[in-house]
Image (spheres, helix red, strand yellow):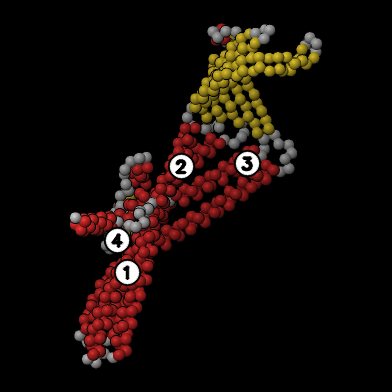
Amino acid sequence: MIKNKVPCALCLFFVLAFSTVRAQQITLTLNRSIEIASDSSLQAFSAKNLYQSSYWAFVSYKAARLPSLTLSLTPLQYYRNIVRRYDSGTNMDVYRPQQSLYSSGGLSLSQNFDLTGGTFYINSDLGYMRNYGDKSYTQFTTTPIQIGYVQNLFGFNSFKWQKRVEPIKFERAKKQYLYDREAISETSALYFFNLATAQAEFDMAKENVVSSDTLYRIGQERHEIASISQSDLLTLKLDAVNARNSLKNAEINLKRAMSSFVSFLNMEKDTQVKLDLPDRPKDVVITVDEALQYARENNPDFLGNRQQILEAEREVDRTKKSSVFDAAFSASVGFNQVADNFSAAYLKPKRQDIFSVGFSIPLIDWGVRKGQANMAKNNLNVAQISVKQKELSLEEDVIMTVNDFNVQQDMIRSAEEALELANLAYDATRQRFIIGNADISSLTLSHNRQNEAQRNYIAALKNYWLSYYKIRKLTLYDFENGKSLSVEFENFYTSLRGGTTKQSRQ
């Protein structure tokens, strides 16, 4: 009975173990790797949260431009203490006990006015007071309505500058999110081809072990009949030993590349991935002029430069206006009343007019405000020069990337042809060596050329796709399908707000 259970248990164990291993082994293409990274990587999570932070900042800015309604309440305020009071009869200050109860509430509606930087408001207040003691009494005070306006006459208008800066900041945030997604695509391609190179090196190392062992065995047979020399046989044996050592190094490099790739995609650490290399891409014609045009229109760094200049100009405006003097006025008109009962407090309200003008003039500040104004002007000049340098550097990066991309398309075709010729040459040389028509040097040279051609082909694919995704990142334009990536932003936005729309890849 026990003997029958043991094989069954072992079979079940091996089935489960095999299923687990199988579940951890997946095959990924370049496009699928990018999709996973854009959805699940830590960089994607960071990009989403950065955009959402900017989104809510813009929502707050828009909300501040709308009328705001505020309710302020003091439901209960009770005092029981001894206070100092002036007695007019004796012309002396005296201490008297006081016991009172207060309650108040108010409703205020305000609206900021961007053009002038002022604020309109409408208020309505109600107050209740109850005094206890020898002469107890109750009073209600009301302000049924009060309409007013507050304005800085010559001061800094923050509302006007917010209206200029905030939309640019939000537009930049949207472009930055698209830019970050394309940066994820570029990084994904880098990890993908690093792993592809490691896998190719490992596969070539395994083939080299098999091939070198086979050739060494053939060499032994030919050495027995004196067909090759002892030195050639030792060379074949050395190649077999070196092939095994190279296989061990290739295995180590493969594990490292696999770990980096899996970690970047935020997958389970023990996941084993087999990559499916993309075919030779179709030709895409990109000119420098159109790439520069799209970069100026879409790249978030150009918007960031505009934002930097505007913020520097805003600081110049603020320090310039505060260096002379500040002046403000407020005016309001309304009604108020006081009575010893609630209903009477709203009967026959009296006119209430308030108007005030205030000035703040710096007489002696030892040049503090003037220094701040001059510093703001210098900072604006520095910002303008810095922005110019950034734009020149970015344009140069676009030009170099486009040139590299156009060259890489030709490099892929050349590398593909070279790989095909190297495979044919090695197969022919190997057959000639087997039948004794080629020496060991010719075989080794042909084999090295084959391996180098394989490496060059993968490197050409890697450089092409890195250049492709970099130019997409710099321009935020899909040259293959002929459309701006900003058109796809609504799909991304739906995903960010809880939808399931994914970015389409070519």
User: Callout 1, which amino acid?
Assistant: Phe
| Vertical position of residue 18 compared to residue 496: above or below | below
Residue picked out by circle 3: 319
> Is 8 left or right of 391, judged from the image as shown?
left
Separation of marks 1 and 2 at Cα, in angstroms: 46 Å
Residue picked out by circle 2: 54
Image location of residue 190, percent across then percent down: 38, 60
Which mark is in front, 1 or 4? Answer: 1
Q: Is residue 13 visible?
A: yes
**Secondary element type, mark 3:** helix
- Tell me which residue sits at (77%, 12%) in the image: 87
Q: Residues within 10 Å of mark 1 (few under 14, many from 20)?
A: many
- Tell me which residue sits at (21%, 81%) in the image: 431
User: Callout 2, which amino acid?
Assistant: Ser
Separation of marks 3 and 2 at Cα, in angstroms: 27 Å
User: Callout 4, which amino acid?
Assistant: Leu
- Tell me which residue sits at (23%, 56%) in the image: 9
Q: Mark 3 touching mark 4, by CB under 8 A?
A: no
Q: Mark 2 touching mark 4, by CB under 8 A?
A: no
Q: Residues within 10 Å of mark 4 (few under 14, many from 20)?
A: some
> Is 67 left or right of 227, judged from the image as shown?
right
Separation of marks 3 and 1 at Cα, in angstroms: 65 Å
Image location of residue 349, percent across then percent down: 57, 10
Point out which mark residue 275 bears. 4
Residue picked out by circle 1: 202
Q: Quadrant of residue 355?
A: top right
Q: Residues within 10 Å of mark 3 (few under 14, many from 20)?
A: many
Depth check: give the residue in front, 332 or 505: 505
Q: Which of the two labelled residues, at mark 1 and mark 2, occupies the earlier sequence position?
A: 2
Which mark is in front, 3 or 2? Answer: 2
Image location of residue 200, percent across then percent down: 31, 68
User: Callout 3, which amino acid?
Assistant: Thr
